[in-house]
Image: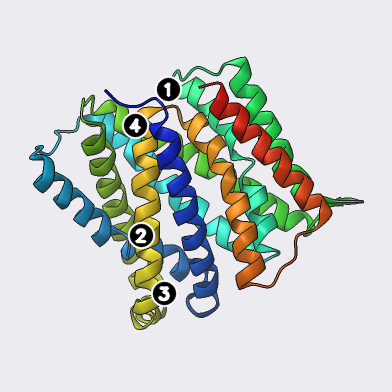
Amino acid sequence: MIAAWLWAIFTIIAAFAQTVRNAMQRELTGTLGTAGATHVRFLFGFPFALLFLIVLMGVTGAPLPRPGLKFWQWTIDGALFQIGATALMLMAMGERSFVVTIAYIKTEPIQVAIFGLLFLGDAVTWPMMTAILVATAGVIVMSTKPGGMVGGVKATLLGLASGGMFALSAIGYRGGILSLDLSDYMMAATFTLVVGLAMQAAALSLYLWLRQPSVMIALMKAWRPSLFAGFMGALASQFWFLAFALTSAANVRTLALIEVLYAQLIARFSFGQRTTPREAIGMVLVVAGVMLLILTH
């Protein structure tokens, strides 16, 4: 029997690993550009995801799934939207603060709840919607200052668009996992991750070799920091997919707002950015929304 709270543990681990990966990608953007830094999570993440699958098969003896057409439709959608979302996220990070960029992107849960209801039939209860609204209010508070949004219209639109694409990506991947119709949720999640990363790594590698070969050369030269970013990306994705296999994407992405708290810690100790009183209030709201979500499950 699967513990009802296991999805929450998976999400907390995934959010931490993703925050570390985001910080690494931000650092790589200066030398690799947006396209190169975006590709790091896919090209260097795929070997680790494949290793996760091989280990899982070796330990459990489970066979590979036989995916149908719906699996490919959902997973391709998830993979393409994730590429676009990651690129927009890194562009937004180039415009302003690391913490507030994450805050813009994390307006995602409301969109996830709507898309999940429309495309997958995932129920949205009133307590869940209340938790989503409270937590989202927290990230909006963190993103504003007296007189309007911080960072200008461009940064705001990039962050919001990235959040929307991440929402559609989450729905696509959860749809792919569910379409396998497996009782073994770990195999369903891990197999979907490997297929998604394989498509992303192949597509972006081909694009960069044809359009920006210098970026691919620079990426290979920066293999050491890229390898760590790839590992953290694969680790984060592994736990995201495990969580998606157990509960709705809206639940996962709302709890994932704790990434804002992780981002604050990284920004403070790695980038020397201070927490403002407004950001502190926002973080309190995020925590309140997350706690409400957990208590209602």
Q: Which of marks 1 and 2 is nearer the N terminus?
A: 2
Mark sitting earlier along the chain (4/1): 1
Give the residue type at disc 2.
Phe
Q: Residue at x 49, y 49 (%)?
A: 15
x%, y% of residue 26? Answer: 55, 68
Which of pointers 4 and 3 lies earlier in the amino acid sequence?
3
- Residue 141 location in percent, x, y? 78, 44
Q: Position of residue 261 (x, y in %)?
A: 62, 51
Q: Name the residue under label 1.
A: 120
Residue under pointer 2: 42
Q: In this view, does 86 lie to the left or right of 46?
A: right
Whole-number angstrom distance, CA of label 2 to CA of label 4: 21 Å
Residue contact between numbered discs 2 and 4, judged by CB atoms under 8 Å: no
Say which element carries label 4.
helix
Q: Disc 1 marks which amino acid?
A: Leu
Whether residue 92 is visible here, answered yes or no, is no
- Which disc is residue 212 wearing? 3
x, y percent for residue 179 = 28, 27
